[in-house]
Image (spheres, rainbow, N blue to C red):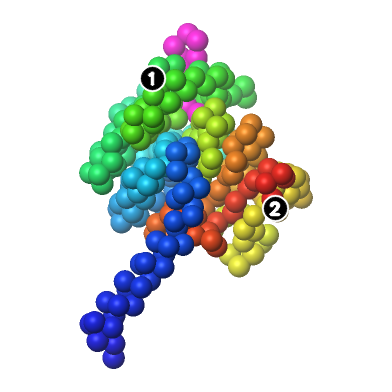
């Protein structure tokens, strides 16, 4: 049986080894922007939620500039149910009529966003909540498909407000609601918003927290995780059906962000405690990292 002092020594040795391994990455990424799309189980499990918030504050404390983007589908569904509005989906997109858009905006901007801000502040960070409307951060346009209502796409991005906040040491938390030129609000996919903001900010990394280990050659087998791939490989996996279903838009937004200058895009399992730190600050990482071809070496 291991005595207390031996256990303490082993624990401390592990902690020091981890910190030592993290140091080169901290030095490499200090001052760089990292956009984190927060979603999935990490938003629903209170213990995971706390760890993600601490990780985000840690990034800020060691000199990185985190920007958080979030959705909130389950919370929207819960409030639609409370208000007697039946959620509807078409081709994987939420049908967003006027009444549903009101609920989406109320939930994402008024509840989910402020909860995340509060949790980051409680963890010792300085967070500020925004949506696409604030400072004309995002101008939206209709997604274009018929019968889906106020579902939007990113038309333009103006990063002045984000730039000002991150340079002042604040952690922006952005909900995926924006308006068009007339002021009409639109519900935009949060992965898409994360990718477009990462590109506009010239981010070092764009990280999607998901409920999957990453990109798998066989979606039923976690051991087939593809740890690193470039844009061409990602497109090939989509065209051959290896990447399918809900992973297509996630990989697609990663590819688009890389094509616009983001250095690396990551799809990681947010169900793993401290997934962000494991992916950024360890040699092995835990998920799939997508890069442009010139960065594959």
Q: Secondary structure at mark 2?
A: loop
> Percent from the top left, x then y, of residue 1?
28, 91
Is residue 228 shown in magenta?
A: no
Is residue 185 shown in magenta?
A: yes
Which region is colored magenta? 179-189
| Residue 118 seen by the camera | yes
**Residue at (55%, 50%) from the top-left corner?**
267
**Quarter-wise, where is residue 228 in the image?**
bottom right
Relative side of 3 to 235, left or right: left
Residue holding disc 1:
134
**Residue at (53%, 36%) from the top-left corner?**
203
> Percent from the top left, x then y, of residue 181?
50, 10
Specify few, some or many for label 2: CA neighbours under 10 Å numbering under 14, 14-19, or 20 or more: few
Residue holding disc 2:
297
**With respect to residue 76, does 187 lie above or below?**
above
| Nearer the camera: disc 1 or disc 2 | 2
Q: CA distance from mark 1 to mark 2?
A: 40 Å
Relative side of 244 to 201, left or right: right
Q: Which mark is residue 213?
A: none
> Percent from the top left, x then y, of residue 272?
43, 60
**Residue at (59%, 37%) from the top-left corner?**
262
**Residue at (47%, 8%) from the top-left corner?**
182
**With respect to residue 203, does 286 lie above or below?**
below
**Quarter-wise, where is residue 199 in the image?**
top right
């Amino acid at each position: 049986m291991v005595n207390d002092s031996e256990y303490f020594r082993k624990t401390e040795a592990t902690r020091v080894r981890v910190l030592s391994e993290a140091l080169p990455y901290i030095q490499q990424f200090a001052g760089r922007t990292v956009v984190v799309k927060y979603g999935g189980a990490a938003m629903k499990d209170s213990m995971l939620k706390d760890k993600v918030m601490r990780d985000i504050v840690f990034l800020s404390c060691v000199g990185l500039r985190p920007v958080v983007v979030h959705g909130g589908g389950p919370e929207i569904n819960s409030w639609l149910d409370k208000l007697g509005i039946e959620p509807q989906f078409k081709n994987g997109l939420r049908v967003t009529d006027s009444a549903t858009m009101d609920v989406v905006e109320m939930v994402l901007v008024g509840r989910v966003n402020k909860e995340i801000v509060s949790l980051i502040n409680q963890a010792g960070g300085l967070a500020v909540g925004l949506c696409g409307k604030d400072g004309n951060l995002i101008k939206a346009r209709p997604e274009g498909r018929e019968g889906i209502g106020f579902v939007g796409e990113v038309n333009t991005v103006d990063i002045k407000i984000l730039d000002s906040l991150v340079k002042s040491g604040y952690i922006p938390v952005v909900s995926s609601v924006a308006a068009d030129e007339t002021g009409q609000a639109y519900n935009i996919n949060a992965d898409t918003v994360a990718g477009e903001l990462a590109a506009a900010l010239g981010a070092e990394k764009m990280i999607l927290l998901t409920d999957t280990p990453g990109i798998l050659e066989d979606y039923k087998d976690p051991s087939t995780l593809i740890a690193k791939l470039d844009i061409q490989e990602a497109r090939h996996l989509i065209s051959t059906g290896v990447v399918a279903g809900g992973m297509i838009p996630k990989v697609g937004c990663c590819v688009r962000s890389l094509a616009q200058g983001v250095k690396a895009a990551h799809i990681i399992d947010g169900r793993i405690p401290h997934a962000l730190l494991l992916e950024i600050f360890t040699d092995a990482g835990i998920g799939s990292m997508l890069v442009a071809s010139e960065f594959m070496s």
